[in-house]
């Protein structure tokens, strides 16, 4: 077979052609676009909720661990406070480091307490 080449010698003038608007096709395209947008919005909303729940779970776990850590520190501080406020320890510091002594009977002064009545007078 021989190579055949065809050449169009005349130009086709398509500038004058007017394409008619197909309203049914445009309506279908709009419906497909709206359906796609709604579907994408639903997927995004589901994904956002899912990842937000996962993030909240991680945050709750971090806060639980921080709470346990803070409770452990609170227990340690309570024990330290109790040991520092021990009367035996205070007495040992007072007598050993500060050179204090227990008062003799003549050095003790008893002060009686009183309460005030509602009308402003003292009560013994």
Image (cartoon, rainbow, N blue to C red):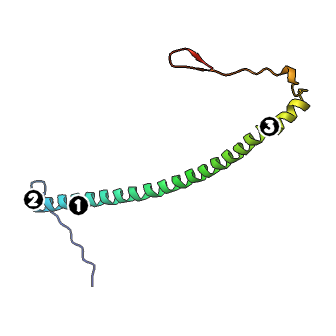
Dot 1 corresponds to which residue?
Answer: 35
Q: Quadrant of residue 2?
A: bottom left
Residue corresponding to mark 2? 23
Q: Which one is earlier in the sequence, the residue at label 2 or at label 3?
A: 2
Which is nearer the N-term, disc 2 or disc 1?
2
Left or right? Give the position of 124 relative to 14: right
Closer to the camera: disc 1 or disc 3? 3
Q: Is residue 106 above or below residue 96?
A: above
Q: Nearer the viewer, residue 61 or 122?
A: 122
- Vertical comparison of 101 with 69: above or below: above
Left or right, 39 with respect to 60, comes to left
Which residue is under mark 3?
87
Residue sitting at 86 percent across and 30 percent down?
Answer: 94
Q: Which residue shows up at 86% across the image and 25% down it?
A: 103
From where the camera sits, is residue 64 visible? yes
Q: Residue at x 21, y 72 (%)?
A: 6
Q: Position of residue 119 (x, y in %)?
A: 50, 16
Give how far apart the Cα atoms at labels 1 and 3 are: 79 Å
Q: Residue at x 57, y 53 (%)?
A: 64
**Distance between mark 2 and mark 3 Cα atoms:** 96 Å
Does the rendering let one see residue 22? no
Q: Quadrant of the N terminus?
A: bottom left
């Amino acid at each position: 077979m021989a190579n055949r080449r065809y050449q169009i010698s005349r130009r086709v003038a398509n500038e004058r052609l007017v394409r008619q608007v197909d309203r049914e096709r445009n309506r279908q395209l709009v419906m497909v676009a709206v359906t796609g947008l709604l579907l994408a919005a639903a997927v995004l909303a589901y994904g956002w909720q899912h990842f937000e729940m996962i993030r909240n779970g991680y945050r709750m776990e971090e806060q639980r661990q921080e709470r346990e850590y803070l409770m452990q520190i609170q227990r340690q501080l309570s024990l330290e406070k109790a040991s520092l406020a021990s009367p035996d320890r205070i007495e040992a510091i007072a007598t050993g480091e500060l050179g204090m002594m227990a008062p003799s009977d003549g050095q003790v002064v008893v002060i009686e307490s009183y309460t005030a009545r509602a009308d402003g007078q003292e009560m013994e």
